[in-house]
Image: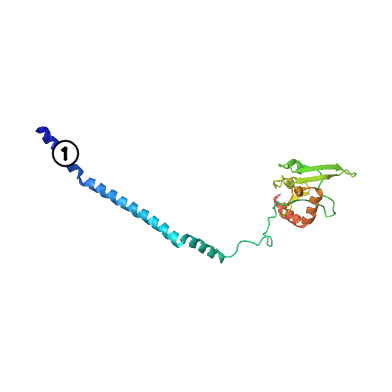
Amino acid sequence: VLAGQALQGSTNHGLRLSGHPFSTMKDDKEREQLAKDLSRDWYSVFERSINTLFLTEMVRGLSLTLKYFFDKKVTINYPFEKGPLSPRFRGEHALRRYPTGEERCIACKLCEAVCPAQAITIEAEEREDGSRRTTRYDIDMTKCIYCGFCQEACPVDAIVEGPNFEFATETHEELLYDKEKLLENGDRWETEIAENLRSESLYR
């Protein structure tokens, strides 16, 4: 009898614990959180459906395009229009002459020695007056990295990187420059090259 009463008491006590107000509050909070999660999921599905149905993303993108359509243009109509170049721009190589027409290069081969890409090949000979001049001056433009070391090393400003950047070719051989090609570039761009060197002289 005592054992039965004790078992019944423990069962009633367990029932009373399961109906504790703290347990009920916990269940209510879980149900509220579940309802919030469901409503949030349904809202996101609804929002995506609206965006898809009414193409809001496309309209937003088109409105941005329309806004910039009436703004001031920042592009140029290349190749009919060209932007300014820095005096230190490193473009197509050129060999320069003195105003008398004499070649500036004295065949010291400093440019050949300093070139990190080993793109320059020079052969020289001594003249009757004792001066040295190049008989061969080749630059492999496919190797050149446009570092400007050749121009910086030259003691007489003979080899320079000019302002021309439009020298695309259709064949590899056209980018193997010889002395005649380099002198032709120098004659063509001498005015711009001389002006750039003058403006840069204070910083060299």
Residue 104 visible in the displayed image: no
Residue farthest to the right? Answer: 128
Residue 78: x percent and y percent?
67, 60
Residue farthest to the front? Answer: 53
In the drawing, does residue 82 fall left or right of residue 174? left
Tell me how many marks there are: 1
Residue farthest to the left? Answer: 1
In the image, is residue 167 above or below residue 109?
below
In the image, is residue 183 above or below residue 79?
above
Q: Residue at x 86, y 42 (%)?
A: 125
Residue 147: x percent and y percent?
69, 46
Residue 148: x percent and y percent?
71, 47
Question: Which corner quadrant of the image does residue 129 belong to?
Answer: top right
CA neighbours of label 1 inside 10 A, class few (<14), some (14 to 19), many (20+): few
Residue farthest to the bottom? Answer: 70
Q: Residue at x 12, y 32 (%)?
A: 3
**Residue, disc 1:** 11
In the drawing, does residue 164 fall left or right of residue 126? left
Question: Which corner quadrant of the image does residue 112 belong to?
Answer: top right
Q: Residue at x 49, y 63 (%)?
A: 59
Residue 53 visible in the displayed image: yes
Q: Quadrant of the N terminus?
A: top left
In the drawing, does residue 75 fall left or right of residue 126? left
Residue 46: x percent and y percent?
39, 58
Q: How is the image coloured?
A: rainbow
Tell me the SS state at disc 1.
Answer: helix
Label 1 is placed on what type of residue?
Thr
